[in-house]
């Protein structure tokens, strides 16, 4: 789901002291972008703002022709307060929205004119709604929020009520899908309350538009729609009770977020990875089959949070990140990064590469520590299937030659990207025959953009990859030993070869013909300069660099969606380099520093900040 799928405003009213915008962030939020210096955005028009992907659906729901020609400064927003954008996903529902300060309510509603006021049950607050979006003003702060039940929650509740009424399986009885079954809305709400646990039931709250307004005959789909509306309203009531009555928000719930808000950087970032893991949809089988193990693994991941600061300098944007984690996980990370940098990898990175990274970990030490931390947890799980898995792991640990395994891949590796190359290939076209009303296939010649990449890792056992390659060569003539390198013909898009180099304690995969045929021993004087190589060696477990202008021009358009290509097009023409450095990993944290050097002044720092935020959002999806 997108970070801001559709957003609603909720307006609160203060009593004696003015409420800050960050105090309206619900504790359910697991991801927060907070922009401190909103004055940077005052030169950005609303028309430009809503073009960003992270504002796309806000535009669809909230903005219309009334924004034309207006700037954010004319929208009634208080630029002395923070703008906080958040998203959260729980077991039963998702929340998304943003909070901000209000300076002029009249101007605000000239821009956001789709909301209608409804009665508020909370003293000192004003509630407004627009479809499923909700807006509330409290003093000079506002919350824009939407609460959306998870699909599984809606389906389970609908099925439970449907079958409790004696209906047949709708998937085997198509008439039940579309033919009505008598269902009054008020009865529906009572039935949903019976299905909910006590913690999920809302307390006080106002009557949001619900299914009870339309008592009529409902088929399965209509019943499902009603369930979704009722759940949506009940979850929103619960959230409002917690936020407005109990005064519980993310600032009070997580001291790490509260501390991050005190930073004076232009923007801050917060991501609670431990709660993301807890609510991950793909773990439902794990949760159901191994509940005890799942709980124990949650404890291992407790405390895992990513905190960040955005800093705008005259000629650069800097994104400082700090990954924090608990003692158990930290002990594994610390062992993983206790390794010596293999300088051989620097021989194979050309100084003119568009982008490259180095990665240096100790796989042997990390494995041993992970075995010590995780195996006792797995052993305690009383489950036949898990017991069999534990036995398998223990036997493999005893029988596998770990010296050979971790000697083959020690842990140091690198990757590089050097633009794209046009290659001749074929593709299938589907042609419609208007006479026979059928499609038929036709193979046609085509040209494709192929990224030029290299990926390599250090090894003490080059004999093992050689054994694998020799075996593959016996199976197919497409694998050939060319002396200085191996080649796998037509490996990429069934048109371009893949080269493998096993030399100098390195094993390398590449489709760069020049590297394989002319530089199998490294680039020599054309490799990274001593200055650049020193940066890579001094960084922690990872280092990366990208020439932004060259990379943008070199990205193959076919690899991205139309929407992502629009973002890339918007970034064309920007110069400078991005550089990622990391600290040494300690038992409780690792620091990352991403710097984008523009190499010159820019007209609007707010515009660059939004560009960067949008890029981070696209990556986070």
Image (cartoon, rainbow, N blue to C red):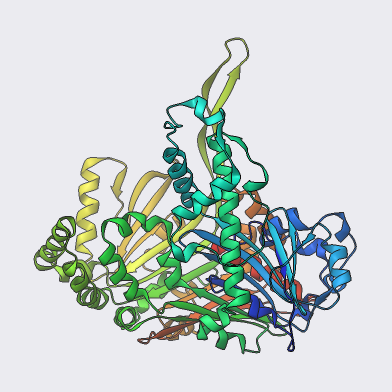
Residue pushed farthest right? 69
Residue visible at 57% across and 30% down in the picture: 180
Q: Nearer the viewer, residue 313 or 62?
A: 62
Residue visible at 55% across and 69% down in the picture: 352
Q: Nearer the viewer, residue 506 or 524?
A: 506
Residue pushed farthest top? 435
Can residue 237 be seen by looking at this rendering?
A: yes
Q: Nearer the viewer, residue 287 or 459?
A: 287
Q: Position of residue 585 (x, y in %)?
A: 38, 84
Is residue 76 found left or right of 440 in the rendered image? right
Which quadrant of the figure contains the N terminus? bottom right
Q: Position of residue 301 (x, y in %)?
A: 36, 74
Numbered-mark total: 0
Q: Position of residue 341 (x, y in %)?
A: 35, 81
Residue 76, placed above or below residue 281: below
Q: Nearer the viewer, residue 318 or 410?
A: 318
Residue 145, placed above or below residue 22: above
Which quadrant of the figure contains the C terminus? bottom right
Q: Position of residue 250 (x, y in %)?
A: 56, 78
Is residue 235 found left or right of 392 in the rendered image? right
Q: Quadrant of residue 17?
A: bottom right
Can residue 593 be seen by looking at this rendering?
A: no
Residue 570, placed above or below residue 79: above
Is residue 363 found left or right of 88 in the rendered image? left
């Amino acid at each position: 789901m997108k970070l801001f799928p559709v957003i609603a405003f909720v307006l609160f009213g203060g009593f004696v002291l003015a409420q800050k915008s960050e105090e309206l962030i619900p504790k359910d939020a697991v991801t927060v972008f907070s922009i401190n210096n909103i004055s940077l955005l005052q030169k950005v028009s609303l028309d430009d703002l809503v073009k960003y992907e992270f504002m796309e659906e806000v535009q669809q729901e909230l903005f219309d022709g009334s924004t034309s020609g207006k700037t954010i400064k004319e929208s009634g927003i208080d630029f002395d307060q923070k703008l906080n954008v958040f998203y959260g996903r729980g077991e039963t529902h998702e929340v998304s929205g943003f909070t901000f300060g209000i300076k002029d309510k009249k101007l605000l509603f000239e821009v956001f004119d789709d909301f209608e006021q409804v009665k508020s049950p909370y003293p000192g607050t004003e509630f407004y709604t627009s479809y499923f979006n909700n807006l509330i003003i409290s003093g000079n702060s506002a919350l824009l929020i939407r609460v959306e039940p998870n699909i599984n929650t809606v389906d389970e509740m609908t099925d439970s009520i449907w079958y409790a009424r004696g209906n047949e399986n709708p998937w085997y009885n198509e008439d039940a899908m579309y033919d009505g079954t008598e269902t009054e809305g008020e009865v529906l709400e009572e039935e949903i309350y019976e299905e909910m646990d006590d913690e999920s039931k809302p307390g006080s709250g106002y009557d949001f538009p619900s299914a009870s307004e339309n008592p009529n005959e409902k088929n399965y789909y209509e019943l499902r729609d009603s369930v979704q509306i009722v759940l949506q309203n009940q979850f929103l009531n619960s959230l409002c009770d917690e936020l407005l009555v109990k005064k519980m928000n993310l600032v009070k719930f997580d001291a790490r977020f509260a501390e991050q808000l005190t930073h004076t950087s232009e923007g801050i970032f917060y991501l609670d990875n431990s709660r993301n893991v807890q609510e991950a949809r793909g773990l439902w089988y794990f949760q159901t089959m191994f509940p005890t193990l799942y709980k124990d693994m949650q404890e291992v991941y407790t405390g895992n949070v990513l905190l960040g600061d955005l800093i705008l300098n005259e000629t650069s944007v800097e994104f400082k990140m700090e990954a924090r984690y608990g003692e158990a996980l930290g002990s594994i990370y610390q062992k993983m990064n206790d390794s010596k940098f293999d300088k051989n990898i620097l021989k194979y990175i050309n100084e003119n590469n568009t982008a490259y990274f180095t990665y240096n970990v100790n796989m042997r030490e990390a494995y041993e520590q992970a075995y010590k931390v995780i195996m006792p947890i797995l052993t305690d799980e009383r489950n036949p299937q898990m017991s069999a898995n534990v036995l398998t792991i223990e036997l493999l640990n005893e029988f596998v030659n770990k010296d050979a395994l971790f000697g083959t891949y020690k842990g140091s590796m690198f990757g590089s990207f050097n633009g794209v190359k046009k290659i001749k290939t074929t593709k299938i076209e589907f042609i419609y025959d208007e006479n026979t009303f059928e499609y038929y296939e036709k193979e046609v010649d085509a040209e494709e953009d192929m990224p030029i990449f290299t990926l390599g890792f250090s090894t003490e056992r080059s004999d093992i990859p050689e054994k694998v390659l020799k075996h593959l060569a016996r199976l197919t003539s497409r694998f050939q030993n060319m002396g200085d390198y191996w080649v796998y013909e037509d490996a990429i898009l069934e048109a371009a070869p893949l080269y493998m180099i096993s030399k100098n304690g390195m094993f390398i995969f590449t489709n760069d013909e020049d590297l394989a045929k002319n530089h199998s021993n490294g680039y020599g004087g054309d490799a990274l300069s001593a200055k650049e190589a020193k940066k890579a060696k001094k960084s922690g477990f990872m280092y990366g660099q990208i020439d932004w202008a060259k990379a943008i021009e070199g990205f193959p358009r076919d690899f991205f969606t139309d929407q992502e290509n629009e973002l890339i097009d918007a970034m064309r023409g920007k110069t400078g380099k991005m550089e990622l450095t990391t600290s040494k990993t300690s038992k409780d944290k690792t620091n990352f520093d991403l710097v984008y050097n523009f190499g010159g002044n820019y007209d609007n720092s707010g515009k660059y900040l939004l560009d960067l935020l949008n890029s981070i959002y696209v990556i986070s999806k």
